[in-house]
Image: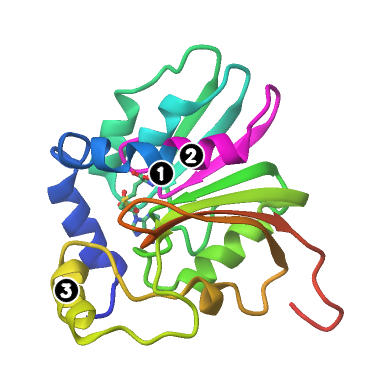
Amino acid sequence: MQMNNQRNRFVYRLWAPVYDVVLERFFRGGRSRSMERLALKAGERVCFVGVGTGADLLYLPKGVNGIGVDLSEAMLARAEKKLPIAGCDIELRIGDAQALPFDDGGFDAVILNLILSVVPDPARCMSEAIRVLRPGGRIVIFDKFLPDGTEPTWGRRLSNLVSTRLGTDLNRRLGDILCGLPCEVVHDEPSILWGMYRVVLLRQAPWQVGHR
Ligand SMILES: C[S@@+](CC[C@H](N)C(=O)[O-])C[C@H]1O[C@@H](n2cnc3c(N)ncnc32)[C@H](O)[C@@H]1O
């Protein structure tokens, strides 16, 4: 089943009241590792793409400011309850990860936790994340991927029929998503569920001549 924004809005409206209760503990290790790897510093400006209930906000060091964007009003309402974050200036906004409502180059860092497996067009989402980064800015990803160059097993295809209905795709490959985009992987480590989830740090690289 293909993901689409209309269904995502519906599914995440259902998830919103229970998301933290059901999933916060499960994702905690990978999430904290992703924030550790991103190593935000005071004064930096960060964009949370698909911020959801704002679970990442709780890992911010003091002095960081930024904006969280999400398609779902219900998820954002949960994130709103986590504000204010001591020492940080955070704004929340409705928006589409595939067409971020920001100018080019305005952020030092972008957080793409558990969003590339959710948006209808992950390459578009990735390209937008790169666009809003300053030159040399960094992106962290915590998400599940199919290993590059492999095909899903039948079991995984069947599980995906359920999973996509619950708002996430099990069978996306990070290599396919990044293909041709101006960024480089600077760190990639296995995370929860025996490495099905990964924590990846990327750095924006200049566009090749002729691209864009
Ligand atoms: C699995 S949740 C992850 C939330 C959060 N990033 C986290 O780490 O817990 C996926 C989020 O993506 C949001 N979403 C889905 N499609 C989106 C889109 N096109 N643009 C922005 N957000 C989207 C959903 O509303 C939901 O809040």
Above or below, comparing residue 157 to residue 100 in the picture: below
- Judging depth in this view, the residue of 119 and 197 nearest the camera is 197
Residue 33 numbered mark, or none: 2
From the viewer's side, name the closer residue of 62 and 4. Answer: 62
Which amino acid type is shown beneath numbered disc 1?
Gly
In the displayed structure, 109 sits above or below 194; it is above
Q: What element does badge 1 sit on?
A: helix
Instruction: Estimate the spatial distance between the alpha carbons at disc 2 and disc 1, rounded to whole Å.
Output: 5 Å
**Label 3 SS:** helix
Q: Are marks 3 and 2 in contact (CB under 8 Å)?
A: no
Q: Position of residue 98 (x, y in %)?
A: 48, 64
The answer to whether one can see residue 102 in this image is no
User: Residue 46 bears which disc, if any?
Assistant: none
In the rendered image, the quadrant that contains the C terminus is: bottom right
Q: Does the magenta run of residues contain 33? A: yes
Relative image position of residue 84 (x, y in whole percent): 42, 17
Position of the N terminus, as image quadrant, is bottom left
What's drawn in magenta, residue-wise?
32-54
